[in-house]
Amino acid sequence: VDQLVDHILSYPLQTRIQLLAPLVQNRKGEHKEELEEARKEGFVRVMINGKMRDLSENIILDKKSKHTIDIVVDRLVQKPDIRSRLMDSVETALKLTDGLIKIELVDEKRVEILSESNSCPDCGIGYPELTPQHFSFNSPLGMCSHCNGLGTTMEFDPDLIIPDKSLSIMQGAVDHWGVMSLKQNSWRMRILQALALEYNFSLNTPWQDLSPDVRQILLYGSGHRKIHLSWKSDNSSGQFSTRYEGLIPSLGRRMNETSSEYMRRYYMKYISDKSCPVCAGKKLRPESLAVKVGAKNIYELTTLSISEAVTFFDNLKLKGNKLLIAQEILKEIRNRLNFLINVGLHYLNLSRKAPTLSGGESQRIRLASQIGSSLVGVMYILDEPSIGLHQRDNRRLIDMLLHLRDLGNTVIVVEHDEEMIRSSDQILDFGPRAGIYGGEIVFQGTVDEIVKDPESLTGQYLSGKLKIEYPVKRRFAQKNFLHIKGAGQNNLKNIDVAIPIGVFTCITGVSGSGKSSLINQILYPVMANKLHRSTLREGKYEDIEGLDNFDKVINIDQQPIGRTPRSNPATYIKLFDPIRILFAQLPASKLRGYKPGRFSFNVRGGRCEACQGAGVKQIEMHFLPDIFVTCEVCKGHRYNRETLAVKFKDKNISEILDLDVQEAMELFQNIPSITKKLQTLIDVGLEYIKLGQSSTTLSGGEAQRVKLSRELSKTSTGRTLYILDEPTTGLHFDDIKKLLNVLQRLVTMGNTVVVIEHNLDVIKCSDHIIDLGPEGGDEGGRIIATGTPEEIAIHPHSYTGKFLQKVLKRS
């Protein structure tokens, strides 16, 4: 007690102090008994969740929420003669809380937690009794108070504000200012000219050549130093001095002051996540980070990859009581880490953020947790767990599923992977084709039986009667290459990569080897910024040569083509435009004076106004996802009665949108402007989808092929780079065959195609392979081999080559 009192008396004189007894810390409940006991003890005030309450009130707390309750034991001002009073108050607080006390310094708005057992009077840090919550960045007890456990804060980013640093201010280097706002007599121009005069720099100097001090002033202001402004007009003239606010403080102030959601979105484009300045991205309080096991705190442990964590815990040497305490805990930790390794996730960091995981990685993490539970009699349903998994790791995954089965569970897998299909006990093959041409069970039985069934498309590919042929002649890299130098993003080891131009290149390697870092975080952002003036964040690299060989870059991913029922394949590939023009040219339309816009469900005139052409109405469910119900006026047809009266071959515009691609091809067979675009959908294997099908109902693979169809319908310049990341996700053997035909067609037209892929049928059909590895995570990021599929297949150190060798022999 004396030490605690001495520490409190060390505060400066006149410091206002509140002595608090922490009664409840972050616990659910109404806590009626604790509050009633405090009243009986004669206390007057209590702090509940940071707010002062009077105990004479009828305090009712939500029993389902967590609460922190501190009894106000005393409130006093630091003076030389308060020691006796302070001793009594400290003793009272410690008795109430079994040795714990909070000291609130009112003027500094700072709280210290002091304890009889866990406190340091010298540095002022106090530790409550440690619980698991103190090591969780999701708990108020453990999280960094500045960033609330996120590890990052949202701040204005100079790289986004000045995207092209080779430009000068007068050339529009500052995106927010642009060029138009820098007119000679504008107020902004006068301020900038005064700044240039005061700090001796030119507004025509490229941003990158300005001194660091000048860039700092332009971005963050002149501080206390003033600039001198003068003006002269027909009516008046004058001069005065003012401080320059700075670009970033100005943007922040305007964003806080605006009530316009549009303007807030505008300012948000200049904001990015920055590492928290207090915890440096570690997410936890200093008290939590001070606790160490094996010389590592919890942050240092979670930055390890799963394989590194296994090594750490295997080498952790504990003795005596420490070993006795940790024995069972270590056993559980090792088991869980080994489950993750067994499903091929050894390369992931323990602290990897969930949104950055692929669908396959997320699914395998959940699978690992289920394997660890050792439950029996459970039905497990998995949707394509092999997504993003290299063939080397695929066998491990299959063995884990077989293990779940052998425990006494039922495992149902939706899958296209050949090895997974061959490992199953029972196969249900749906078909015979896709979409409206499917929906039937074509076959049910074993692998040996399906290969003999002529009705099963899957069986014919498994038996070899149908197969994906690799090209008889490969395109070889000529003189032109796209050179990426010094690629060092994430785990890439400052590698130099040469991608041949005008050929079909596959980027291969085990999961986590650096494929996405190279292509999606370096190559695509750099090319998009250069060719399309985008402002994407670029990964770490030194230089890229060969960009002049391209006029555009297209990243064909599996993101939805639209997020509302209004978006559909017909509108996305610009097929709906010639259809509307056709309807406007019909006699019935000309008689009524209808233009093409009449047949658009996105503009007034022809659409149903009750649902504004959506065909459905959106009902907000507040705490649940919104639901869509069919419009009761147009019954889902989207158009009003007058528009629906116009027909082409007995079909109105709504019925046209309800046709599938194959049916539409027959209907419009004599109209080239329409059939040309429909043919591109057929070429990518989407003859079964409806023209007006809502984009929200398309799978990732279907959305990707719609995007490919749109590219095919455009006039090619032969100078486009197409990037695809695992385009075979969700595709059957037959769909992969069609996809490859499309990709080969794009290359034949002179374009360059780069595909990140694990599927061996795609890899064997490529012209050039760049194989990364040898492992995932820190053990990857190097180029293992480059060359044709035949050259990779005989490479002694390529995992991809070992599996590719078997496929090439079989083909």
Image (tube, rainbow, N blue to C red):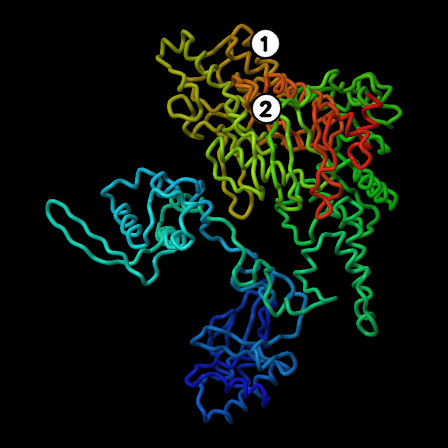
> Which element carries disc 1, helix, strand or loop?
helix
Mark in front: 1 vs 2? 2
Depth order, front residue of 554/603: 554
State which quadrant residue 379 falls in.
Answer: top right
- Residue 147 x/y as whole percent: 53, 59
Work out which quarter of the rendered image holds the N terminus and state it.
bottom right
Kind of residue sitting beneath label 1: Glu
Whether residue 120 is visible: yes
State which quadrant residue 112 falls in.
Answer: bottom right
Looking at the image, which residue is at 38% across and 44% down?
A: 263
**Disc 2: which residue:** 708
**Disc 1: which residue:** 666
Please, is residue 762 above or below residue 251 in the view? above
Q: What is the C-alpha distance between the residues marked 1 and 2?
A: 22 Å
Please, is residue 317 above or below residue 681 in the view? below
Kind of residue sitting beneath label 2: Leu
Whether residue 36 is visible: no
Depth order, front residue of 771/617: 771
Please, is residue 242 above or below residue 538 in the view? below
Viewed as shown, does residue 50 lie left or right of 400? left
Depth order, front residue of 596/224: 224
Work out which quarter of the rendered image holds the C terminus and state it.
top right
Viewed as shown, does residue 733 lie left or right of 444? left
